């Protein structure tokens, strides 16, 4: 068995000195068993690293990090993807003033932003772990190892997907490189082609299990990632692939039809997907009729702890200050109170009183108060961050909750009712709520978008598919006249908020920057409460300056 170690630092060397705000970055695994082929648990350990590289920051607890010199919480993989795909959009305002955060929230970032640097290294560090496993098992032909290798390729494809989505160009290397060979920078289109070839091979040749072991990726997850790649093909490669996306969606949907909500395969209750018991909806989770989470990452409050992932989303959404939100009502012992929904996000639910997707929110100022002679009610969507100081600590906005530590036993007919009685949930510092990466509901919405934007597929099918999603949430069904791009985008926001798709969705639909951008509160300028236009080049994040300094042949993205 070959032993190679690919420790990628954005194209730099194994140990690279960085500026003082980042420190030395070293992503070498600390456990010698991970690179020791004589250890009987060698393969299990190394494939586990490919998963935990997404779930946690390090192997010594939530405060540890594979990437030294970066805060373990802020640099956690799924926290990075939330920050980059949610903070700059109409879905979220993060009201703390942590270094690098305000520029992400108001879309004024530059190539020195520490959050962008952390995300770049985190994604490439995960690619390194997958490369290491693939290199170390290159000569193995037993069925179990081949299955693991297929999983590692899908997980690596996910990280390369995030790289081309967020940074366009990417540092690139695979397990086939010679020892000591430096990574190269490849274009976004080249990255698209590599990801497509990897996923097609795994999916079309059935190299991965259709029913995986709980917590591991299987056929649905791999094909859903391929569908998402095709959904964004025009942005990533310059050529639209709507029909290919729709075909992959149909493959997945056929495998799920017959169970769940109205026979769609969706979970009967939306909020169950984001509670402590959601593992049954995961791949291999046991509830085969409602395995809506096609690709997800497992968490456990004792064994898999992180300040990223679902812990981050739960704790950030809940807070006693300003809203009098009892953390016991949400299943956490550590409310952070730093997420707020801008008015434009809250208004997407206006008039949808039966929609359960915002049933856990605290809307507007709570309780009712009077500001500048105007009364604001507890359920007033119009709050506009009254008293906002620019210091990123405010009582304004709407407390937008989705993920919780609640148990299904706390719910009544699929709805968690936040009231003075609270719940019987266990309140813990870390969450046991698993984190969805791609859900079946997203696949249904992808199919409908392909019909709306690409004029592919059948109108009746597209309408049925979006209505499965709407009706499951308690909203009224759409008619054919409602199949518009704006309605589709609003539905994606309602269904998928916090699930790391919003910035990508807006860019794909020409709504994030430029003349067709929608203007949102505070986006574009800290000083402009109503928001302003965002420059076109902000459709991509910059390559961090530290990467360019370490790899002089790498090119910066236009506009930076």
Image (cartoon, rainbow, N blue to C red):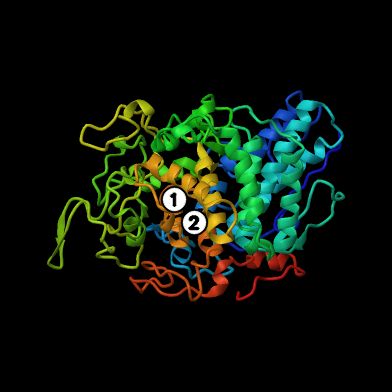
Figure check: 399 above or below 300: below
Q: Residue at x 59, y 45 (%)?
A: 65
Figure check: 355 above or below 412: below
Estimate how packed mark 1 is, as few (under 14), some (14 to 19) or many (20 or more) residues with alpha carbons within 10 Å: some
Question: Does 138 sit left or right of 486 as displayed?
Answer: right
2 and 1 marks in contact (CB < 8 Å): yes
| Helix, strand or loop for disc 1 | loop
| Quadrant that contains the C terminus | bottom right
Residue under label 2: 502
Image x and y of residue 442, in percent: 52, 46
| Quadrant that contains the N terminus | top right
Give me the C-alpha separation between circle 2 and circle 1.
7 Å
Q: Residue at x 65, y 42 (%)?
A: 223
Estimate how packed mark 2 is, as few (under 14), some (14 to 19) or many (20 or more) residues with alpha carbons within 10 Å: many
In the rendered structure, which disc, 2 or 1, sits on the residue that comes first in sequence? 1
Picture quadrant of residue 546: bottom right
Q: Residue at x 26, y 61 (%)?
A: 382
Give the camera-side residue of 63 and 200.
200
Question: Does 338 sit left or right of 163 as displayed?
Answer: left
Give the camera-side residue of 522 and 311.
522
Residue furthest out toward the left: 373
């Amino acid at each position: 068995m070959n032993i190679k170690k690919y420790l990628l630092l954005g194209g730099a060397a194994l140990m690279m000195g960085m500026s003082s705000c980042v420190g030395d970055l070293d992503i070498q695994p600390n456990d010698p068993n991970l690179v020791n082929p004589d250890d009987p648990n060698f393969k299990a350990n190394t494939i586990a690293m490919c998963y935990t590289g997404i779930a946690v920051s390090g192997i010594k607890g939530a405060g540890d990090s594979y990437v030294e010199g970066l805060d373990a919480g802020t640099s956690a993989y799924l926290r990075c993807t939330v920050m980059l795909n949610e903070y700059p959009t109409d879905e979220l305002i993060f009201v703390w003033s942590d270094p690098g955060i305000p520029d992400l929230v108001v879309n004024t970032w530059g190539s020195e932003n520490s959050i962008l640097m952390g995300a770049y290294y985190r994604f490439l560090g995960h690619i390194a772990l997958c490369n290491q496993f693939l290199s170390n098992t290159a000569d193995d032909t037993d069925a179990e190892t081949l299955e693991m290798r297929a999983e590692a390729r899908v997980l690596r494809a996910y990280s390369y997907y995030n790289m081309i989505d967020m940074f366009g160009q990417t540092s690139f290397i695979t397990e086939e490189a010679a020892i000591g060979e430096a990574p190269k920078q490849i274009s976004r289109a080249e990255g698209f082609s590599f990801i497509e070839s990897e996923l097609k091979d795994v999916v079309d040749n059935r190299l991965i299990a259709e029913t995986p072991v709980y917590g591991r990726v299987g056929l649905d997850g791999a094909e859903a990632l391929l569908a998402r790649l095709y959904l964004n093909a025009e942005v990533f490669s310059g050529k639209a692939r709507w029909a290919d996306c729709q075909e992959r969606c149909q493959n997945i949907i056929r495998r799920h039809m017959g169970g769940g909500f109205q026979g769609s395969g969706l979970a009967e209750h939306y909020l169950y997907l984001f509670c402590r018991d959601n593992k049954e909806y995961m791949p291999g989770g046991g509830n085969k009729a409602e395995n809506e989470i096609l690709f997800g990452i497992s968490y456990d409050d004792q064994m898999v702890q992180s300040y990223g992932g679902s812990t981050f989303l739960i704790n950030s959404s809940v807070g006693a200050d300003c809203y009098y939100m009892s953390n016991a009502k949400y299943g956490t012992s550590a409310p952070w109170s730093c997420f707020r929904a801008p008015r434009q996000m809250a208004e997407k639910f206006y008039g949808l009183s039966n929609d359960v997707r915002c049933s856990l929110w605290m809307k507007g100022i709570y309780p009712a108060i009077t500001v500048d002679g105007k009364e604001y009610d507890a359920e007033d969507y119009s709050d506009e961050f009254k008293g906002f100081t620019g210091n990123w600590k405010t009582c304004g906005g709407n407390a937008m909750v989705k993920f919780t530590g609640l148990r299904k036993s706390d719910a009544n007919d699929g709805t968690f009712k936040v009231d003075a009685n609270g719940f019987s949930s266990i309140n813990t510092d870390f969450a046991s709520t698993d984190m969805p990466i791609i859900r079946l509901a997203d696949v249904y919405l992808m199919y409908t978008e392909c019909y709306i934007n690409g004029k592919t597929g059948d109108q009746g099918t597209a309408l049925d598919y979006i209505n499965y999603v709407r009706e499951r949430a308690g909203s009224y069904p759409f008619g054919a006249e409602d199949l518009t791009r704006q309605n589709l985008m609003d539905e994606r926001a309602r269904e998928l908020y916090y699930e790391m798709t919003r910035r990508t969705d807006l860019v794909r639909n020409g709504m994030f920057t430029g003349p067709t951008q929608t203007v949102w509160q505070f986006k574009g300028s800290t000083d402009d409460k109503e928001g302003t236009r965002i420059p076109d080049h902000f459709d991509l994040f910059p390559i961090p300056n530290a990467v360019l300094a370490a790899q002089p042949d790498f090119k910066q993205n236009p506009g930076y």
